Amino acid sequence: MSKNPRIGIILEPWESDSFLPEPVMAEFYRLSDSIHLVASSRFPDGEGLTGWLQEIRPEILVTGWTTPRLPEDLTSEVPDLRYVCHLVGSVRSTIPERLIGEGLLITNWGHSIARTVAECALMLAIAGLRGASYWTLEMHCRGGWKDRTTTVTGSLFGRKVGIHGFGGISQELRKLLVPFGVPVMTYSPSVPDKLLEEFDVTRAESLEELFSQNDVIVELAALTPKTRGMVNEELLRSIPRGGIFVNVGRGAVVDEEALARVARDGHIQVALDVYAEEPLPEDSPFRHLDHVLTLPHLAGPTVDRRQDAAWHGLENIRRYLRGEPLQSRITPEVSRRIS
Amino acid sequence: MSKNPRIGIILEPWESDSFLPEPVMAEFYRLSDSIHLVASSRFPDGEGLTGWLQEIRPEILVTGWTTPRLPEDLTSEVPDLRYVCHLVGSVRSTIPERLIGEGLLITNWGHSIARTVAECALMLAIAGLRGASYWTLEMHCRGGWKDRTTTVTGSLFGRKVGIHGFGGISQELRKLLVPFGVPVMTYSPSVPDKLLEEFDVTRAESLEELFSQNDVIVELAALTPKTRGMVNEELLRSIPRGGIFVNVGRGAVVDEEALARVARDGHIQVALDVYAEEPLPEDSPFRHLDHVLTLPHLAGPTVDRRQDAAWHGLENIRRYLRGEPLQSRITPEVSRRIS
């Protein structure tokens, strides 16, 4: 750990433009005058990367979506390296499993982008209840207009909200729901009572209870072997008529064929940002159901808030330099759990 | 004023179904056992209405969107009538100007539906910044998917919000913005400092200041001779790049031709629920600009919250029966101001 650490940053220009705008870079230069920024595309298929690293000898490496996969023998080839500050989420395509077990410090964006995903979930719930997808298509493609006697619209006010999973995004969503005065329930077995109390959230004893007792369901469970396909047709059909199912978590947690059937029946609204297969195949029924609101996995972070992940990384670098524990560490245990 | 007043309700069935669901009707029957509900369509062009009123002799009349225009000589023909509880907004097509000046008590839905409009404004701001209209059309009509390197999305976090007008809807919107932690400014010359302090809102000294110093602009000014066309091209072009203009107020406050030009340039997002001419003409440019989010004037109230207007009316009927002042009264002065 040094006062003026050598820092390597490997990102494409479009990536550094959004993650590291000028105020963020100014902070980096306050920490070190030995910062080496290189474009990921300089290392096609990783070629030349080890050589560059041996030349720069970074103590801290900042990585992102485009950074080539780091070499398996990184720690022996670049012995000064102590900390890989991964600015984005999944480390799988960037950092070999072996390095995670070798005592190298590794962090990711943690919960720093959670609020933008929560914001998107809130928007999808309100927009879905209003029929925004149907009305966008009607207004733009079919010259449509509402009919006061038959058009059905719904509000978030007066509803009961059920959230599947209670991690960082759910916690941010709970905050955004406060002014709506809606009761919030969650099914998240591993979350302690104390946290639910702190956020004024009731515990559902089962997924069945969550889906049948709330009319706005937000899917935010992590994808694990246990949760894959867990949201089945019976659960989806138990959502009270006039309700909505929003997915901003992981597509594969849901039986999508069942979801398409339920959406087609029209008893509930459906709003989706994520899908089991991405990009969403052209023949997906969700593309052809006018009232299913679909976004192309852009809940978070928005481009203008990518810098939040960099501020989070910077804070971790400061902690590293002060010898303090880091946030959002990727340990072997964490890596096993989320992969 | 009597303990068991005769109450007449003139609404179409689809209207009474949504405004007066069972729990609301139960409350009406708690106030009186002399309630007469009749379908508006029984009086085509108002024919037969006076006869029905003379037969029922209501002390209180409950009216809505479909209620035929009340006769000019209502107070002499139905001398027992004291109070017209109009469940919706504008009274112009239902209640002749002359009656408003005659000492008849008249109320409308007041601010009871403001929160649903505010919710829609919040949704439009978030959805607009995400490009939801463009992505709905891309996903449903063109088999599209995002491109991480070029797709631009924005968040409400980190923005500055400017609201034109600070009436009931703006006040509800301000509450919904609290968890976003965004500073809020308003241009609303007639609103006292005390109210702005209470809501933690800064005053803009001019519309120029409001538009140029905030990047999320929400249009909620009342339509008056002074505000008609007030939002011109210069103001719209002064919104900082990457911002958004949301209109959930009145379409004619905006120079729509200028707005279409500004929207076409793409420096800001645009999300609209209201238009100078409604239904929006088929050849309106807003229908043909993919990134302009358009709804068909459905911000409020949603069908499931029309009952809020009825609960508000019921509270007024209770106040009337107790001899207390009514809320949301339509006096000659109010009528002149909003017409």
Image: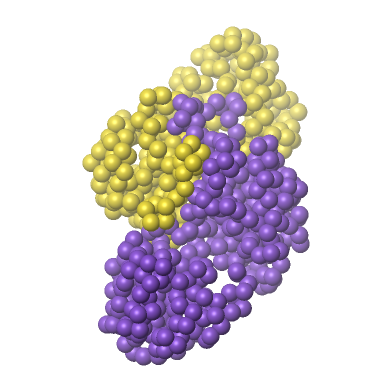
Chain colours: A purple, B yellow
Quarter location, residue A323: bottom left
Along the viewing direction, whichever of A320 and B191 lies nearer the viewer: A320
Q: Residue at x 29, y 51 (%)?
A: B241
**Residue at image location 63% in from the left, 62% down from the top:** A223
Q: Position of residue B21 (x, y in %)?
A: 69, 34
Image location of residue B246, percent across then percent down: 39, 43
Q: Is residue A234 visible?
A: yes
Farthest left residue in view: B234
Give the percent coordinates (x, y) of residue B73.
Answer: 53, 13
> Quick check: A183 above or below B66?
below
What residue is at 66 percent from the left and 23 percent from the top?
Answer: B13
Quarter of the picture containing the C terminus of chain A is bottom right
Q: Give the number of marks.
A: 0
Quadrant of the rendering where the N terminus of chain A is positioned = bottom left
Q: Report x, y in % for residue B132.
A: 46, 45
In the foreground, B276 or A290: A290
Nearest the viewer among B332 and B231 is B231
**Is B73 positioned to the left or the right of B34 in the image?**
left
- Residue at left offset 46%, top offset 30%: A141
**Residue B59, picture quadrant:** top right
* Depth check, front residue: A217 or B30: A217
Res B337 visible: no
Vertical position of residue B119 compared to residue B180: above or below: above
